[in-house]
Image: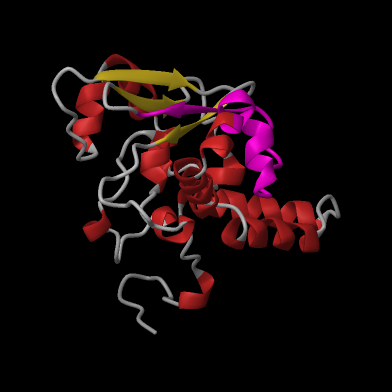
Amino acid sequence: MGKDDGHDHHDHEHSHLEGMELKVRTLESLLVEKGYVDPGALDEIVETYETRVGPRNGAKVVARAWSDAAYLERLREDATAAIAELGFSGRQGEHMRIVENTAEVHNMVVCTLCSCYPWPVLGLPPVWYKSAPYRSRAVSEPETVLAEFGVKLPEGKTIRVWDSTAEMRYLVIPERPPQTQGWDEEQLAALVTRDSMIGTGLALSPGAASGQAT
């Protein structure tokens, strides 16, 4: 224990949490302590978003859309219902619409007001999706934002930016990579990243799929 600076340095007296995480933990503790929140319910929510909700669900939707023309048509007609066919539904997934990338059009999703996001198929939104710079620049300079994500589109390709709201959430169906004929849905899903379903990325090429995280 050092006394040189007039403080006792007991590690256990100091939280390693910072900023918003510390505030959330403090609020959670207060709500549990006062009996407003069931700790078991909190654990269930955390477990759900850690293991059952996330971009792997969206990747399965995309892989099915790439493989099954009838399913793609159902997605176009009623994405909420078609996604629910695969078991992915619930809060923040009630009003879904797909937008399809083509050789002529690239789609990109933002929520300019807050961070509306399709949780059942993409999980919780990344920090950058909620940031003010992304929310403003995705609309005003989408090509530059895409470049910062490492996406360079062919000259002349149209970029369409969709503003997600509480009434409508979007899932981008990226272009199916070439040289994937005959692949099954599990193989195809491995090529689909979270960013490609937001539009700030592209689907992986077959050779780049291994070792990539979504």
61 relative position to 131: left or right: right
- Residue appearing at x 38%, y 49% in the figure: 193
- Residue appearing at x 47%, y 46% in the figure: 67
Q: Nearer the viewer, residue 170 or 22?
A: 170
Q: Which of 30 and 200 is in front in this view?
A: 200
- Residue appearing at x 70%, y 39% in the figure: 91
Q: Which of 92 and 46 is in front in this view?
A: 92
Region rendered in magenta: 74-101
Quadrant location of the N terminus in the rendered image: bottom left
Snapshot colouring: secondary structure
Q: Position of residue 4 (x, y in %)?
A: 30, 76
Q: Can residue 63 be seen in this view?
A: yes
83 relative position to 179: left or right: right
Q: Is residue 124 visible?
A: no
Q: Is residue 210 magenta?
A: no
As drawn, the residue found furthest toward the bottom would be 1
Q: Where is residue 189 in the image (x, y as percent from the top left)?
A: 44, 54
78 relative position to 195: left or right: right
Q: Where is residue 183 in the image (x, y as percent from the top left)?
A: 39, 57
